[in-house]
């Protein structure tokens, strides 16, 4: 996957935050978050200005890409894809 989708943690609905689970990846040591119904886990990054951003892989496979897009749209989450 050569592209990534980014969302702002502050823009997430509180119900998703409350039901999410977080852990530290044993290989990369990155902080990872999983949300109910989301087809992928996201990596949590704290930006230099203190905002929290979540990075998701943006799949090349249409079905997977649409599943992630549908999940974000269903929850009203704005996102940016960077290649």
Image (tube, helix red, strand yellow):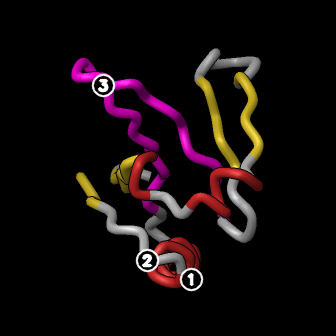
Position of 22 compared to 55: left or right?
A: right
**Helix, strand or loop at disc 3?**
loop
Q: Position of residue 25 (x, y in %)?
A: 71, 24
User: Which residue is drawn at the image coordinates 76% and 18% (left, top)?
Assistant: 26
- Above or below residue 56? Residue 15 is below
The reply to whether callout 2 and callout 1 are in contact (CB within 8 Å) is no
Going from N to C along the chain, the mark reached first, 3 or 1, is 3
Q: Which disc, if any, is residue 63? A: 1
Q: Position of residue 19 (x, y in %)?
A: 76, 55
Q: CA distance from mark 2 to mark 3?
A: 23 Å
- Above or below residue 32? Residue 81 is below
Going from N to C along the chain, the mark reached first, 2 or 3, is 3
Residue tagged by mark 3?
47
Q: CA distance from mark 3 to mark 1?
A: 31 Å
Going from N to C along the chain, the mark reached first, 2 or 1, is 1
Instruction: Please say whether residue 5 is visible from this viewpoint.
Output: yes
Residue tagged by mark 2?
76
User: Which residue is drawn at the image coordinates 33% and 68% (left, top)?
Assistant: 78
Q: How many other residues sit within 10 Å of disc 1, few (<14), some (14-19) or many (≥20)?
A: few
**Helix, strand or loop at disc 2?**
loop
Q: How many other residues sit within 10 Å of disc 2, few (<14), some (14-19) or many (≥20)?
A: few
Asked where in the image residue 13 lies, by quadrant, the reply is: bottom right
């Amino acid at each position: 996957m050569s592209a990534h989708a980014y969302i702002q943690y502050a823009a997430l609905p509180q119900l998703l935050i409350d039901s999410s689970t977080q852990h530290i990846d044993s290989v990369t040591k990155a902080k990872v978050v999983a949300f109910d119904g989301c087809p992928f886990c996201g990596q949590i990054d704290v930006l230099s200005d203190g905002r929290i951003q979540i990075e998701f892989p943006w799949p090349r496979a249409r079905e997977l890409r649409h599943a992630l897009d549908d999940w974000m749209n269903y929850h009203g989450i704005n996102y940016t894809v960077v290649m």
